[in-house]
Amino acid sequence: MKNLRLKAARALLDMSQQELADAVHVSRQTINAIEKGDYNPTIRLCRAICRVLGKGLDELFWEGDE
């Protein structure tokens, strides 16, 4: 499932995939794969992304009744 919430949060901060990748010490391709739903990140990576974007885990990664 695509992670449009992650993409939107990143865009809201005017941050490129590369900038987010650099901030959390992964490749741009990893961020792209997470956004496309092709990669399920570790909880450690999820937490790092949340810290950089100023969001909670539930806001970006937990599937709910949307």
Image (tube, rainbow, N blue to C red):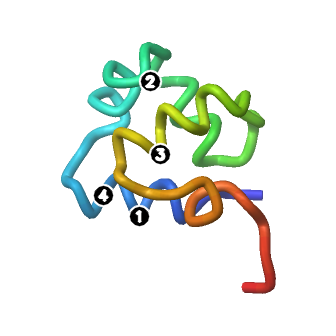
The residue at which mark 2 appears reads as 28
Q: Which mark is residue 11?
A: 4
C-alpha gap between disc 2 and disc 4: 15 Å
The residue at which mark 1 appears reads as 8
* Residue at (37, 36) in percent of width and height: 17
Q: Which mark is residue 50?
A: 3
Q: Residues within 10 Å of mark 2 (few under 14, many from 20)?
A: some
Q: Residues within 10 Å of mark 4 (few under 14, many from 20)?
A: few
Q: Are marks 1 and 4 in contact (CB under 8 Å)?
A: yes
Q: Residue furthest bottom?
A: 66
Disc 4 marks a residue whose amino acid type is Ala
* Residue at (27, 29) in percent of width and height: 19
Secondary structure beneath disc 4? helix
What is the x, y in percent for residue 2? 68, 57
Disc 2 marks a residue whose amino acid type is Arg
Secondary structure beneath disc 2? helix
